[in-house]
Image (tube, rainbow, N blue to C red):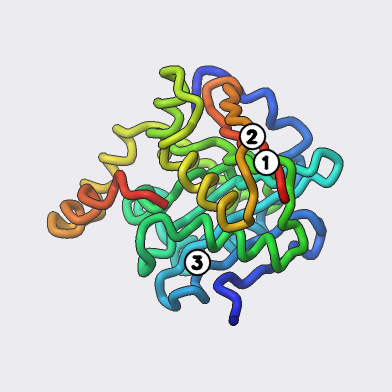
Amino acid sequence: MSNLTTIRRSPSNPYRLFLDFDSASPGGLGGAGILYDPSRDVISIDAVHKNINLPTRSTGALIADGLTQAGVSKPAILEGFNVEKSTAAALGSGSDGRGTLIGNMLADTAKALGATITLWEPIRDGGIWHLRIHLSHP
Amino acid sequence: MTADSPVLVGERFNEEGSWILRQFVALEDLRRPPEEYVAKHAHLLGNFSFHLYRYDEPELGDWVRRVGQLLSTDADVERCRELYLPPAELAEIRLREAGEF
């Protein structure tokens, strides 16, 4: 099966990746900026843009496909860094992130990687929020 | 951008950001005013942190910091949309705004 996502690696940082979603549905654009921290086994998503041609809840599978190609398909933690406003508002109101836009995207990524979520961890960081999910793998 | 400064940012963003920004944002969008980029793309962005990086190209740094600033408030996003989007496109974006990723 052909890959959905095209990965590009930064020429100056081997742990910095761009996952290009346009190849999944050309013309729809979209992609994600990824930073991998090997010391903590954390995949941090520091920006994500939908492919506008794909159905909702497609982005997690695209991220998972890119991570698998990059050889980091079993991270301990997936993180959405500086989440969008509706997710941030929910986290600020006490949600653990389940059912939010970014929470669902991270959960879809975990599912596509075949992982189980063991912990939802919202992190307040000054005036912004990050959302982490901790994973176990078979 | 916000009253409180992020504390986890630190060394993570002590990296030149032009490579990743140029992957993420199409060249034609980088040539648009930040307000127009925000008008057309805010509803498609799940999270955005590129304004926190270091930029050796001052114009690129100014552009992305302005995008980050505009994305941080609903009022600024709305103002950009009303400035740059025709009514039909604005209505469509509002329908899609809460869409899942």
Residue A15 locus on image (x, y percent): 78, 54
Q: Amino acid under label 1?
A: Leu
Q: Which residue is mark 3?
A: B26
B58 lies left or right of B80: right
Neighbour tally class for label 3: few under 14, some 14-19, many 20 plus, Cα within 10 Å: few
Foreground: B52 or A86?
Answer: A86
Residue B69 locus on image (x, y percent): 46, 36
Q: Amino acid under label 2?
A: Thr
Q: Which residue is mark 1?
A: A135
Q: Residue at x 73, y 48 (%)?
A: A75
Neighbour tally class for label 2: few under 14, some 14-19, many 20 plus, Cα within 10 Å: few
The mark found on residue A118 in the picture is 2
Q: Residue at x 38, y 33 (%)?
A: A86
A117 lies left or right of B71: right
Assign a secondary structure to mark 1.
strand
The mark found on residue B37 in the picture is none
